[in-house]
Image (cartoon, grey):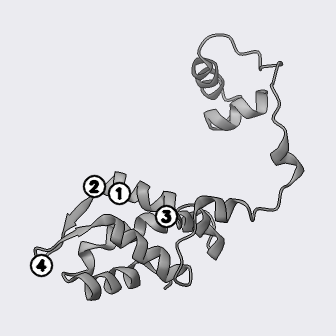
Amino acid sequence: MAHPLHHAESSARKYGGKPSDYQALHEFFDVSKEHLALFVHRAYRHNTLGIFELERQFGRTLTNSAGRVIPTRWIGEQHVREDCQGRIPSLADWLIRIRPEPWMANGRIDFDPPDIVGDPRVAWMAEVAAGRTILGLKDWMEGRG
């Protein structure tokens, strides 16, 4: 399966109703494609945790257009099985396969915060008004820090 619509059509065949009854649930699983259009995007929600998050987000059941009450967990399990060769991995199954990089291992505490006194938006707006910057607030603050 490659698209939430195809999953929704599969759900309609399996549980009745129309694909639109299921579309939003299947889109929930594939939201991470916005950030990475490779299959590894599935690590985000194609797992047991993602299925339970779906249930919390959409409720324990949905009533499809045919009037049938369907557990949302069934829809989540169907989506994950269709994309993961019939299995439902845990979040740990995905995370254990991440290749560690040095930047992941140690945090650091920044003891040298930027010298911004008061509301930084006021200083930024003054610089914009005076023609000293055309940067947005976030970029301006990053440039100062």
Marks 4 and 2: CB-CB under 8 Å?
A: no
Give the residue type that dot 4 points to: Ala
Q: Residue at x 75, y 65 (%)?
A: 97
Give the residue type that dot 3 points to: Val
**Is 71 in front, or is 26?**
71
Is the residue 68 above or below the residue 86 in the image? above
Residue 52 placed where, x, y %?
42, 57
Marks 2 and 1: CB-CB under 8 Å?
A: yes
Q: Residue at x 66, y 24 (%)?
A: 127
Q: CA distance from mark 4 to mark 3?
A: 27 Å
Is 119 placed left or right of 19 in the picture? right
Give the residue type that dot 1 points to: Glu
Is 61 placed left or right of 68 in the picture? right
Q: Which mark is residue 66?
A: 4
Mark 1 = which residue? 55
Q: CA distance from mark 4 to mark 1?
A: 21 Å
Residue 136 placed where, x, y %?
62, 37
